[in-house]
Image (spheres, rainbow, N blue to C red):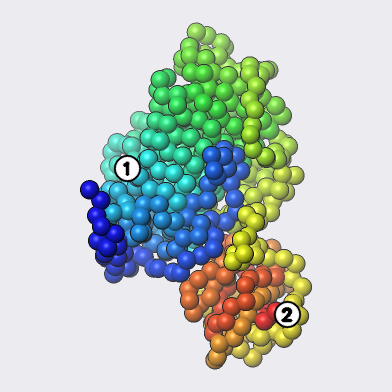
């Protein structure tokens, strides 16, 4: 029998207090949006995938704090955005109990929950030998994280050796801008990087790196597990993978604009009635990149616009049906969502600039160039996402004469250079990330900010967040310098946080305007 609401809330508060006391969790106010950008592919179907959009934002630096954030919600479906920074490992990942969670030691457990976003922020989020397990859950976003060296044998073990695994009635998952990697194959203790089984549907894997593994991932755990499907893979890098890039058993998979490098044994393995639409991919220095392999249970494929660069093929046999060397289609696949595919020839360049964690969440514009993530159309209370051209708004620059501070000040620069009206001076952090603030002695109304980069450093700023430092809430987020507009807010301190960059950023002026 479920606990009364009051008792569940008390248990949730206790869980959050425990994690906060351990230094692993920070609560902030509810925000208007969750992960940056929006999904393309099958994750947009079946009602779409929004994760924790509209829910409370929590910052976590341990696995235990991630579990505590899940347990601290009013219910298992209460939206939440969990921002993760630092290294998550076995030493800081323990089970937390509560009425809105079902967690475990030694794994990030998303079980019997919904409406959750896990996104890497700040200096990055690395799940080291700790896998992410999604079971009986829906509407989940995982973005901008690295998951590495998860083992099923040896020590320590986690998640059956899968970097990210989904099973048992999972619906609507978007995994984006992640780096999933191992250090060998099954004999070294590793399993799959991205696995789906037991009725998992409506999934998109985008702008991610999967590398150095015996197995890239599967859809369906056996020839009889064919209730999975509707999975999109786009703008991913598969590098030094032996097989399963992916393995499809039943269902439909859509692979476009992926770069496959050193697929050593077999790549897209469509079998047991599966149908794969394979278009505008770039296959390089690889073997048997498409077909039905290791079984006589046939699968099918539709191909178009792919580039084969030094691809070799094995001979057909009873349990081996390679699609090449001519790669003729054996079926047709109708795709229900809108998408724009880059030409295959530019895929290696576009993927190298966008795929993986820490790339500023950049995406393709569909025409072989990159751009900041496309935000969903904002609601009436949402901040306007992304910077525009740095033309100053009307009125007085409120930064001149104000105070300033921040973090990671580099030698020879001053926070005062942010507000001196001189484009020949600048502030920069000591490394690739940091934050700078403008502050006033009394509450000041602000509705727009202009970030001007110093001469010669244009384009160095990647992903950023603009914060109301008084309340700890996010006013806007995006990619690149420029003009940032947001709902008029009265505050004493406003902080520009650089989440990622290309080199060391240099900010000549941090201007603020009332609008």
Mark 1–mark 2 Cα distance, whole angstroms, equals 52 Å
Up the image or down, 283 lies above or below 497; here it is above
Quadrant in the picture for the C terminus: bottom right
Q: Which residue is mark 1?
A: 158
Q: Nearer the viewer, residue 506 or 132?
A: 132
Residue hosting label 2: 423
Task: Assign a secondary structure to mark 1.
Answer: loop
Of residues 346 and 94, which is closer to you in this image?
94
> Residue at coordinates 53% horizontally, 46% vertically from top-left?
49
Label 2 crowd (10 A; few <14 / some 14-19 / many >=20): some
Q: Position of residue 58 (x, y in %)?
A: 42, 63
Q: Position of residue 200 (x, y in %)?
A: 44, 34
Q: Quadrant of residue 438?
A: bottom right
Q: Secondary structure at mark 2?
A: loop
The mark closer to the camera, 1 or 2, is: 1
Q: Residue furthest top?
A: 318
Q: Residue 235 appears at what percent x and percent y?
A: 61, 41
Please, is residue 400 above or below residue 489 in the view?
A: below
């Amino acid at each position: 029998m479920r606990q009364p609401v009051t008792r569940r809330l008390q248990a949730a508060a206790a869980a959050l207090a425990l994690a906060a006391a351990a230094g692993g969790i920070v609560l902030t106010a509810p925000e208007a949006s969750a992960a940056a950008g929006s999904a393309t592919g099958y994750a947009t179907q079946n009602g779409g995938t929004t994760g924790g959009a509209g829910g409370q934002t929590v910052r976590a630096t341990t696995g235990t704090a991630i579990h505590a954030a899940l347990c601290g919600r009013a219910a298992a479906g209460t939206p939440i955005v969990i921002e993760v920074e630092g290294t998550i490992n076995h030493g800081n990942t323990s089970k937390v109990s509560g009425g809105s969670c079902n967690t475990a030691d030694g794994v990030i457990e998303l079980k019997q929950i919904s409406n959750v976003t896990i996104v890497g922020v700040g200096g990055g989020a690395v799940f080291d030998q700790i896998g992410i397990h999604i079971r009986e859950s829906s509407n989940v976003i995982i973005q901008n994280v690295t998951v590495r060296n998860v083992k099923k044998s040896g020590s320590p073990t986690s998640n059956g050796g899968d970097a990210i695994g989904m099973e048992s009635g999972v619906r609507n998952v978007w995994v984006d801008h992640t780096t999933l990697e191992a250090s060998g194959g099954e004999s070294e203790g590793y399993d799959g990087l991205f696995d789906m089984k037991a009725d998992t549907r409506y999934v998109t894997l985008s702008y991610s790196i999967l590398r150095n593994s015996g197995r890239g991932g599967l859809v369906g755990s056996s020839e009889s597990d064919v209730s999975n499907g509707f999975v999109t893979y786009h703008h991913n890098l598969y590098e030094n993978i032996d097989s399963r890039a992916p393995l499809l058993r039943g269902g439909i998979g859509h692979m476009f604009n992926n770069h496959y490098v050193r697929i050593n044994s077999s790549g897209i393995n469509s079998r047991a009635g599966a149908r794969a639409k394979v278009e505008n991919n770039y296959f390089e220095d690889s073997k048997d990149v498409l077909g039905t392999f290791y079984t006589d249970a046939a699968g099918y494929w539709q191909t178009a616009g792919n580039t084969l660069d030094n691809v070799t093929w094995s001979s057909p046999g009873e349990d081996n049906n390679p699609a090449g060397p001519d790669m003729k289609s054996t079926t047709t696949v109708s795709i229900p969502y809108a998408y724009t595919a880059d030409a295959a020839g530019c895929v290696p360049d576009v993927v190298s600039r966008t795929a993986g964690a820490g790339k500023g969440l950049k995406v393709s514009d569909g025409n072989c160039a990159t751009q900041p993530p496309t935000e969903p159309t904002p609601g009436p209370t949402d901040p306007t996402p992304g910077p525009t051209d740095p033309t100053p708004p009307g009125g007085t620059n409120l930064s001149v004469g104000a105070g300033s501070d921040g973090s990671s000040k580099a030698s020879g620069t001053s926070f005062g250079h942010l507000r001196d009206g001189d484009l020949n001076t600048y502030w920069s952090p000591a490394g690739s990330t940091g934050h700078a603030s403008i502050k006033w002695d009394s509450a000041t109304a602000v509705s727009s900010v202009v970030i001007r980069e110093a001469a010669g450093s244009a384009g160095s700023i990647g992903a950023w967040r603009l914060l109301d430092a008084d309340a700890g809430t996010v006013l806007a987020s995006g990619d690149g310098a420029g003009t940032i507009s947001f709902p008029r807010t009265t505050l004493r301190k406003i902080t520009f946080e650089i989440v990622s960059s290309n080199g060391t950023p240099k900010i000549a002026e941090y201007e603020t305007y009332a609008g």
